[in-house]
Amino acid sequence: MMFTLAEIETAHSEIESGKDFPKFAAKIKELGVCTIETFVEDGSTIYKGEDDSQVTAAQQYAPLLIYGIVNPPKFLEALRHYRQGHIDFFQFCKDCADSGIFKWIVDLNADTCTYYDREGAVVFQEQISHSN
């Protein structure tokens, strides 16, 4: 099943905060998206499907400097604030950069979101909760 960036952007436009992410994840999984790889540096995202199909969303903002030392407590605090809707996506990305988070990958089949540092080490992995 092929999906388009326009379909993904339409689904994304319905997200008001991080707490809406599970609805977005479910919607784009229906389109055929299997993984979402988001780069903190500029907000660019690669959406991949099972049949090696992929679309890329261009950078969302001017490049951020990713801090070289990972700070898990600071990151987890930012993640909590984002999930609760206290900060927007850009602020979450700035907080990730300040915490040493390089990218995250959402696996829609496993319902996980995994955050990585610049070297590719896992900093944190969470299950995506579909109950709201």
Image (spheres, rainbow, N blue to C red):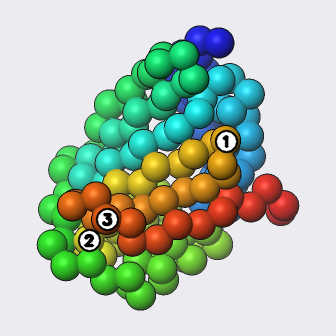
Q: Residue at x 41, y 77 (%)?
A: 75
Local secondary structure at mark 3: loop
C-alpha distance separating marks 3 and 1: 21 Å
Q: Earlier in the sequence, mark 3 or mark 1?
A: 1
Residue at the (31%, 65%) spot, across then down: 121
For residue 100, the mark is: 2
Residue 76: x percent and y percent? 48, 80
Q: Which residue is mark 3?
A: 121
- Check disc 3 and give the amino acid type: Ala
Please tell me which residue lies in front, 43 or 76: 76
Q: Is residue 2 visible?
A: yes
CA separation, marks 2 and 1?
Answer: 27 Å
Identify the residue at image location x=74%, y=46%. 23
Query: Mark 2: which amino acid?
Result: Gly
- Residue 96 is situated, as x and y percent measured from the top left of the image, at 35, 68
Secondary structure found at label 2 = loop
The answer to which of marks 2 and 3 sits earlier in the sequence is 2
The x, y position of residue 104, in whole percent, is 42, 54
For residue 129, above or below residue 70 = above
Q: Are marks 3 and 1 in contact (CB under 8 Å)?
A: no
Q: Kindly state the secondary structure of the residue where label 1 is placed.
A: loop
Check the image and report above or below for 111 versus 119.
Answer: above
Which mark, residue 109? 1
Classify 10 Å Cα crowding around label 3: few (below 14), some (14-19), many (20 and above): few
Q: Are marks 2 and 1 in contact (CB under 8 Å)?
A: no
Q: Earlier in the sequence, mark 2 or mark 1?
A: 2
Foreground mark, 2 or 3?
Answer: 3
- Tell whether 32 sits left or right of 45: right
Question: In the image, what residue type sits under mark 1?
Answer: Asn
